[in-house]
Amino acid sequence: MILRKLYVQVLLAVLVGAVLGYVSPGVATEFKVLSDIFIRMIKMVLAPVIFCTVVLGIAKMDNMKQLGRIGIKSLVYFEVASTLALLIGLLVVNVVRPGSGMNVDISTLDAASVGQYTQAAAKQDGVLDFIVHTVPQSVVDAFARGDILQILFFGVLFGVGLSQIGPTARPAVVFMESFLAAVFRIVSMIMRLAPLGAFGAMAFTIGAYGIGSLLSLGKVLLCVYVTCGLFVGLGFGVVAYLSGFSLWKFLKFIRDEIFTVAGTCSSESVLPQIMRKLEAAGVPKPVVGLVVPGGLSFNADGSAIYFTIAAMFIAQATNTPLNFAQQLTILGVLMLTSKGSAGVAGAGFVTLAATLASMHTIPIEGLVLLLGVDRFMAEARSVTNTIGNAVGAVAVAAWDGCLDRNKLALALDGKVSVSEAVVADHEPEAPFERAPSLKTV
C-alpha cells in the first residue's frame, strides 16, 4: 500500500503541516517540539554510527595506503563540487538579479532582528582555529557534544590502531559490529517518526513566517530552488554518469531520506540512514565513514549555492555596487567560510552573517531581508547537501575501484533489503579488496 511508504507519509505530513500553519499560525508554531524531538533522537545515535562505521571499515583494511587514497579523493571531490556550486550560484544571481529594483534603504532595516545571528557569527573561529578544533581535547567531550569532525578524527586513529594490532583486535571488532547492528535497529525505529518531525517543522515554518514572506521574496527563493535543482540534475548527473550509475535510480533509492530532509531542513536528520543505505548499495565502510560525515562540513554544495545568491541578493537590493574583482573576493571568502557549516537548520544563516561581517563590503543589516524566507531556502540547500554527499560517496568508491557494482545494481533496482544487507552477523568480515575496474557506461 502506497501510504506505508515513508516518503509518502513525510510528504503528506508536510502538506498537513503547511495547511495548519496557514489556517492557525498560533497553534502551528507549538508543534515545533515534534521536530525538535525527532532531530534530538537522530543526534543521539549520530556519534556511535559515525564512530563504529569508520573504525570497522579501517580496522578491516589490509592496506593503509587505501585510507590515504580515499581521503585524498574525498577532499578533491569536496573542493571541486563546492567550488563549482559557488560559481554556478554567482552566475545565476548575476543573470537573474533577484534584488534589482528593490532599492532598500539600509537605515530603515531593523538590525536587532538578526542580532542573534550576528553575535553567533562573531564567535566563529578562523581557518586555523577550525583546523585545531578538529582535534578533540577529550574523547569523552567530543562524544558528549556530538562534534562530528572530532569523532571522525578519533575514529580514524582508533581504526588504524585496531588494524595494526592484528588478531588482538578481533574481540573489539566483533563487539562493535554487534553494537552497530543494534544502533541501526534504533535508527529504524526513529525513522518511523520522521513524518511527525516533518509535520512539526513545516507547521512551525509556515506559522512563524507565513505565506506572505514567500510571495514578497519569491524571486530570490525561486532562484535558489532552480539553481539547486539544476546543480543536482546536471552537476551530479555528470558525476553519476562518469561513475557508471543512474542518478535517477539513485534518487529513487534515497527518496525517503530526501523527503525527510526537505521536511526537517536538516541534513543530519538522515545521516545514519544514508550511511546504512550506501553500505547496502556496495559502498565500503571506510568510504561511507569518511565521505558522508566529512561532507557535512566540507561538501555543503546546496549551502554554497545559497551563500552566493543570498550575498549578491543583499548587495543588489541595497544598491551596493560590486565590481568583478570584488565578486571574486566574495567567492574566495565563501570558499573558506562555507567549510565547517553544520548540517542543521539555521547554521547557514550564521555562516552567511560571518561572511558578510568579515568582508565589510555588503551591509550585514541586509540579512533582515532574508530572515523570513531563510527557513524555506534551508529546505533546498539541505536536500542538495544530502544528495551531494551520497553521490560523492558512491563516486569516490567507484573511482577508487572498491565499489561493489553488483550490490549497487541490485540496490538501485530495488532488489536488496537494506536492513538485511547491513546488519552485521556478529562475525568480522574479510577485508574488502579493490574491485576490478568496469567500463563506464
Image (spheres, helix red, strand yellow):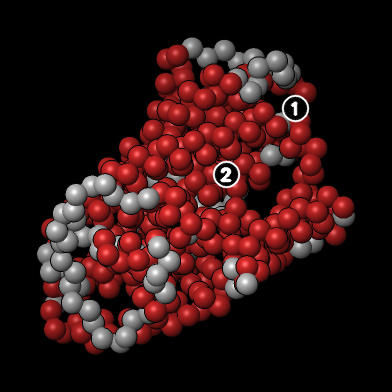
Q: Quadrant of residue 40?
A: bottom right
Give me the residue at 72% from left, 65% from top: 33
Q: Secondary structure at mark 2?
A: helix
Q: Measured from the top left, where is residue 294 in percent x and y?
A: 37, 54
- The residue identified by callout 2 is 380
Q: Earlier in the sequence, mark 2 or mark 1?
A: 1
- Indicate the quadrant containing the N terminus: top left, top right, bottom left or bottom right: bottom right
Q: Quadrant of residue 160?
A: bottom left
Viewer-side residue, 7 vs 301? 7
Judged left or right of residue 52, residue 331 is: right
Distance between mark 2 and mark 1 Cα atoms: 26 Å
Q: Is residue 30 visible?
A: yes
Q: Amino acid at mark 1?
A: Leu
Q: Amino acid type of disc 2?
A: Ala
Residue 119 showing in the rendered view: no
Residue to which mark 1 is pinned: 109
Q: Position of residue 35 (x, y in %)?
A: 67, 63
